[in-house]
Amino acid sequence: MSQTVYTERTYRERAVPDGLTSFRVVVNETDLWIAADRDLTSKALESVQTNRAGIEEYIAAHPLFATSLKVWDQPVPKRSIVARMVDAANAVGIGPMSAVAGSIAEAVARDLIGHTTRVMVENGGDIYLLGGPVRAVGLWAGPSPLSGKVGLSVDPSQGVAVCTSSATVGPSLSLGMADAATVISPSGALADAAATELGNRVRGTGDMEKALNWALSVPGVTGAVVIMGETIGAKGQVELVPINKE
């Protein structure tokens, strides 16, 4: 897995859910912030190591997997995290590593849910929530005046991903200009890959409606939001809510 530039994730300090214990797990490039009923650091670390090993072993055998920006057409292990990444990225027509952060976030959340009634895993702006009541997830959009002031109300009872791509925040590659391109889906892999491509399609506010319509055409995507400067657009099953930063 390729090295990335570290970005200080100060938004984490403002996102601690009431009644939950938060902790951080870091393994090489994977930097997770997790909230659960109790500190599950050791179990989360085991999950990260296992899931990363599956990806790293595949990359060792297929080095182009780590850098490809195109649909991956080589065989992958069935029912593996690599297969989930490939299926998601191929569904939106981009490279498989576009789905890595969301895939790991979901995998860790599902590994932990047997030890907690609810869990939230954040991986570089990609979030997976599983268990518990409806809650608000803040949208962080870099220099936009809307950053941190608006969020999404989501139901995590069966598992939900909220993944964001940005041209102005973090080290991830974006070919567009959106401050935030966010996708909601039951699948962490799909939300991550679709958010990347949604961001790629927004180079100006005039692109937002067409890009959002594209996102909702992807099977498995339930909602999408784009923020660019002072403009916000949303499509699908999206409930925007104000975020109280105090």
Image (cartoon, rainbow, N blue to C red):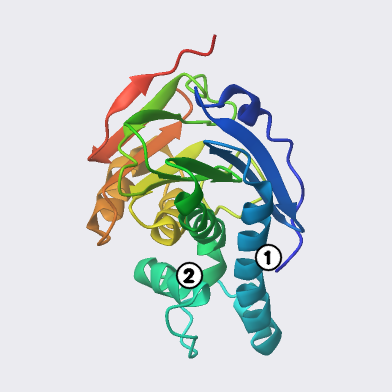
Residue at 43 percent across and 56 percent down: it is 188
Q: Residue furthest top?
A: 246
Q: Earlier in the sequence, mark 1 or mark 2?
A: 1
The part of the image, by quadrant, that contains residue 151 is top left
Closer to us: 68 or 184: 184
Residue placed under numbered mark 2 in the picture? 85
**At label 1, which amino acid type do we have?**
Gln
Q: Is residue 22 above or below residue 53?
A: above
Closer to us: 230 or 66: 66
Residue 240 placement (x, y as % from top left): 31, 26
**At label 2, which amino acid type do we have?**
Met
Closer to us: 10 or 34: 34
Residue placed under numbered mark 1 in the picture? 49
Residue at 44 percent across and 51 percent down: it is 195
Residue at 62 percent across and 74 percent down: it is 55
- Please tell me whether mark 2 sits on a helix, a strand or a loop: helix
